[in-house]
Amino acid sequence: MDLIVYTADGSVQSVSGVNESTTCAQIVYALAHARQQKGRFTLIARLNGSSSQDHRFAPNERPYEFVMKCYEQGLQPEFELLMFDPESHKCDHDEHSQNHALNSSNIPSIGSLKDSSLSYSVDYCRVRPTPPDYNVFMVERCNSLRRCNLVTQKTHTPLTFLNIPNFCLHDLYIHKFEFAQLEALIEIQERTLAAQKTELVRVELTLLDSKERELIQLRKQHNNLLTVLDSLHKSEWQKCVDSESTEAERLNTAIAAMRTAIAEKMREFNEALSLKTTLERQLLNENSVFKLEEKQNFSSNNNE
């Protein structure tokens, strides 16, 4: 369920993922985190927009149940987030405020909010801080891991590199594997991935400074380049290039010969067409002469 909450400055926030197990403290924490504010907050529900019918939620109270009851009674609740004035709060220590006011510093941690799947969205423009640089973030993370590691271990183990088996895709294409061989290949790959994950965690915990991290990165790049060069050497790419060049020359020669043959055939075809036209013309002339002679013979016979 989505919960629409109004704030004192007139803005509107939406908290999604509210369910029957979501408490008021978790909602207030999500809203305070979205607004980047610290202090003591309380969540109030107004029925049908009337300020005379306010309901102030306790920290462990569940707004979902309250909304369901309001819907059953045909009421429309409106929620508002209020922040206590620090000065007035010092003078007000009554039991009601202590039970219903929520201190953002005592609100459940983010880990507890993950179970309730809370998320928020704001419909007004807010200048958010730019995300940290990736390299800076990784350096800080490695430093924090190093500090945690130094607490438990005073000495670090030397860095090692995995002997990862390299599989040529060309070999996989040209070979036909049986089912047992495929299972063995998959098992080797799974073991390799597990070893890589373990080594990655260990490396993150044992790196001491940026120079060692840079050295690890350079060694990885070096190993990758060696792998590429080794595959190029094994594939004998120069011979492949030479054979491809020879085949291309042969095809070009064949194409040129075919073009010459086509031109010769076209010439012969044109000559045949010309000969056909000449023969047809001669045949017409002979037919006309033959008919004329027959006509003359017929007329001479009649005269006799």
Image (cartoon, rainbow, N blue to C red):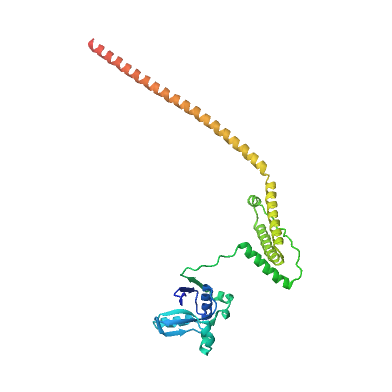
Which residue appears farthest toward the bottom when viewing the image?
Answer: 95
Position of 172 compared to 92: left or right?
A: right
Viewer-side residue, 75 vs 188: 75
Splitting the image into 4 quarters, where does residue 240 fall?
Answer: top right
Q: How many labels, in total?
A: 0
Tell me residue 226's x, y (percent).
70, 51
In depth, the one of 217 and 268 nearer the eye is 217
- Give x and y (percent) for residue 126: 49, 68
Quarter occupied by the C terminus: top left
Residue furthest toward the left?
303
Q: Residue at x 68, y 52 (%)?
A: 225
Q: Position of residue 239 (x, y in %)?
A: 67, 41
* Quarter of the figure with residue 154: bottom right
Q: Is residue 39 above or below residue 96?
A: above
Q: Is residue 85 above or below residue 133?
A: below
Residue 44's place in the image compared with 224, above or below, is below
Query: Which residue is drawn at the image coordinates 50% and 30% (left, top)?
Result: 262
Left or right: 242 as drawn, with respect to 258: right
Does the rendering let one see residue 101?
A: no
Outermost residue to the top: 304
Q: 36 or 286, which lies in front? A: 36
Asked if residue 271 lies left or right of residue 102, the reply is: left
Q: Position of residue 233 (x, y in %)?
A: 70, 46
Q: Residue furthest front?
A: 87
In this rendering, does residue 285 appear at all? yes
